[in-house]
Amino acid sequence: MKQINILQIISSKDAIGGSQEHTRILCAGLDKTKYRVIVVTRPGSIVSYYKEQGFEVVPVELRHNPSSIFKLLGIIKRYKIHIIHTHNMLADRRGCVAGWLGRVPVVVTTIHTLMNTDRFGGQKRGTSICQYNFLLKHVPKKIIALSEEVKYHTQKELNLGEDRIRLIHNASDLSRLNISISKREKKKEFGIDEDCCVVGTVGRLVELKGYPYFIKAAALILKNFPEKMKFLVVGDGYMSHELKTLAKGLGIADKIIFAGQRRDVSEILHILDIFVLPSYYEGLPRSIIEAQACGVAVVATNVGGTPEVVIDDKTGILVPPKNEKAIAKAVIDLLTNKDKAERLGNAGREWVRKQFDAPIFIKRTEDLFEGLVRKYIQDVA
């Protein structure tokens, strides 16, 4: 097979985020002897971050910029693109149109989370959504879903047959979590005593992640464990001020550390005793995969693709969404029963290393690409 030119399009401008990391792992892992990868992103910190990874990056402002279609057509022609692979709604829209106009043989779209879902978990509707659904139903040769729940939801939303969609589970580069750190020194960075328990969470501080319920649960947990207990929130977003205000109002501001956006998450995970993800909905959360890979016991809401990673009472504990009492009860159970926490942490580590490591997802994606090349791009097959 001759070298295939792939144009990855992602409508993000920030370096940190789930779809950004997913795309980074894929671009870094694809076989360089078979694939040349060009990445289009929006201008922002993601450009320099991806260039540091050694990627060929072409920044194009996709938002509120219909002329971006013409820029994409120029890139398609310049690099003789065989496959367009899109990530996120805006990239899907622009990439599908450019792929169709530019007669690119293969367009692939990855659906990272539940399609057309608003920040509260409800379904979006309207002309714009109908147009988006029409494009996805007719342009991509294959749609990739990152979890069983995303696959089911996408098939239902677009009325797709099995032949048009492929499940390739989300994954993480777990090799970078195989590190040895001084927990004492890492805790010291945050002003946490060595013998203090740490319950933490990692993610964007946005509505759909449900972090107010994490803060409310912390207040309930502290009634049982008032001493030697800290809560660590890693990430940034528009809800940051609201969450800090909530913690202050509950009288627990001194117990909750808002660490902001960090590049050392892999180290931070190793100082956690329990990881909590209180989301309203999820595609398949990488933060849980990484916490489990570090052997941390997980408490998460039973939403979206999360149960595919957190098998209740086997690799973690599932609780209902929007329920701080359920979160607090599960965390208190694990803090009280150290053997159970260790058992769930060890089982979670084994589970994700077998099912959700980057090489597995890269191999499955390459297999998909190779099948599409053989079927649609005869001159290079």
Image (tube, helix red, strand yellow):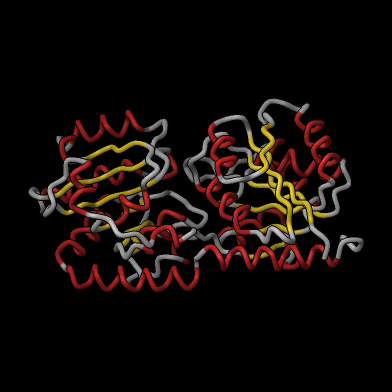
Q: Quadrant of residue 273?
A: bottom left
Count of picture labels:
0
Q: Residue at x 79, y 31 (%)?
A: 71
Residue nearest the observer in this picture, 38 or 355: 38
Q: Position of residue 357 (x, y in %)?
A: 50, 65
Residue 381 lies, with reference to residue 304, above or below; the image says below
Q: Position of residue 180 (x, y in %)?
A: 30, 59
81 sits to left or right of 9: right
364 sits to left or right of 263: right
Q: Residue at x 24, y 67 (%)?
A: 341
211 sits to left or right of 76: left
| Quadrant placement of the N terminus | bottom right
| Quadrant placement of the C terminus | bottom right
239 sits to left or right of 378: left
Q: Position of residue 29 (x, y in %)?
A: 60, 58
Q: Residue at x 34, y 73 (%)?
A: 347
Q: Residue at x 22, y 46 (%)?
A: 231
Residue 47 lies, with reference to residue 365, above or below; the image says above
Q: Position of residue 50 (x, y in %)?
A: 58, 42
Q: Quadrant of residue 318?
A: bottom left
Residue 281 lies, with reference to residue 91, above or below; the image says below
Residue reaching furthest to the right: 379
